[in-house]
């Protein structure tokens, strides 16, 4: 399977008020086409910085970031980002929010209708096209944000703790939504989370990060069959992965004190 995301020898150092903070240390990361890769680790370990480098929001202090065999120098339409907060325009309807990027590209009315219908239905919001964000639940707002990201046909979807602000039941539904959307479109996904269960349920591979400075300490290949439903979290295989990853994180916490 071809590699779609490659990060090599990445260091990231932030400088402010003559103080340097070493955020990432010699990161090497490869994500294959159509893969869901989850980054798991404590706050401050540099997970979101990796996402920002891939999105083109930041440039590394050292090393090279490539997506689709092109060096990342800035933001681009091949990469879409879904944040923890949906960031929908409150004065626009669901339909208008979803097609905002297409309108910026001057897509035809037929394309707006066809593509918005496809992705609004894919995220389970059919019938809510004329609703405004304040009329939607938090989970529905995040569904609209995912549709807005996907409608522009990105080859890579970058998700930065997108369900962290949701209640447990809604979060579970949204995790299943990611599975459903991935089954339909097989978009390459980098998914950042603090939640071990979420990472195992969603991911093909999981990178566990340490902090100060951040590095990918260990990777786990998750060989649970797809399509996955929430029932998988009660299986012995799932619990074995959880036990191994939890042990790794606990060891990291002990050595960092």
Image (cartoon, grey):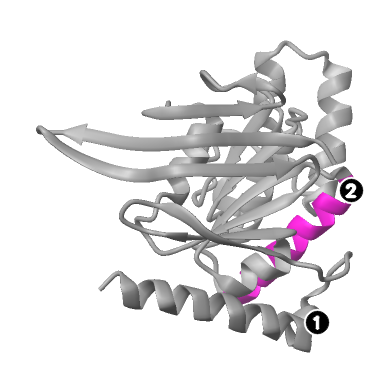
Name the one closer to the observer, 252 or 95.
252
Q: First in sequence: mark 2 or mark 1?
A: 2
Q: Name the element at disc 1.
A: helix
User: What's the residue at 80%, 34% (across, down)?
Assistant: 116
Above or below residue 3? Residue 137 is below
In percent of the image, x 54 and y 66: which residue is there?
166
Q: Is residue 57 visible?
A: no
Predominant SS of the magenta segment = helix
- Is the residue 113 above or below the residue 104 in the image? below
**Badge 2 element:** helix
Pick whichever, 98 or 47, lies toward us: 47
Give the quadrant of the C terminus.
Answer: bottom left
Give the image location of residue 65, x and y in percent.
55, 29
| Rendered location of residue 148, percent (x, y) | 68, 36
Q: Is residue 164 left or right of residue 46?
A: right
Residue that lies at the very extreme toward the left in this rendered image: 17
The quarter of the rendered structure image containing the N terminus is top right
Query: What are the residue bounds of the magenta stretch?
Result: 168-184
Please tell me which residue is depicted at 55% across the width and 33% down the height of the picture.
54
Give the image location of residue 156, x and y in percent: 70, 36
Q: Are marks 2 and 1 in contact (CB under 8 Å)?
A: no
Residue 86: in magenta span: no
* Residue nearest the viewer, comparing 116 with 17: 17
Residue under numbered circle 1? 231
Mark-to-mark CA distance, 2 and 1: 20 Å
Relative to residue 125, is residue 165 drawn left or right? left
Locate residue 188 relative to residue 206 in the image: left or right.
Answer: right
Q: Is residue 173 magenta?
A: yes
Which residue is tagged 2?
Answer: 184
């Amino acid at each position: 399977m071809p590699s779609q995301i490659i990060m090599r020898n990445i260091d990231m150092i932030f400088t402010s008020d003559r103080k340097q903070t070493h955020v990432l240390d010699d990161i090497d990361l490869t994500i294959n086409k159509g893969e869901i890769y989850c980054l798991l680790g404590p706050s401050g370990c540099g997970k979101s910085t990796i996402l920002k480098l891939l999105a083109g929001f930041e440039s590394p202090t050292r090393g090279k970031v490539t997506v689709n065999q092109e060096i990342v120098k800035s933001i681009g339409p091949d990469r879409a980002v879904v944040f923890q907060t949906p960031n929908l325009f409150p004065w626009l309807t669901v339909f208008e929010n979803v097609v905002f990027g297409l309108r910026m590209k001057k897509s035809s009315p037929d394309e707006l209708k066809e593509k918005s219908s496809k992705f609004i239905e894919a995220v389970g919001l059919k019938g809510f096209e004329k609703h405004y964000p304040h009329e939607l639940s938090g989970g529905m707002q995040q569904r609209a944000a995912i549709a807005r990201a996907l409608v522009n046909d990105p080859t890579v979807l970058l998700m930065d703790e997108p369900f962290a602000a949701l209640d447990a039941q809604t979060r579970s539904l949204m995790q299943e939504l990611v599975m459903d959307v991935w089954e339909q479109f097989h978009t390459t996904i980098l998914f950042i989370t603090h939640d071990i269960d979420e990472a195992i349920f969603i991911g093909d591979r999981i990178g566990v990060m340490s902090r100060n400075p951040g590095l990918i300490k260990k990777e786990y290949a998750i060989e649970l069959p797809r399509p996955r439903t929430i029932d998988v979290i009660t299986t012995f295989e799932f619990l074995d992965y959880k036990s191994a990853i939890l042990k790794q994180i606990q060891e990291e916490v002990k050595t960092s004190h």
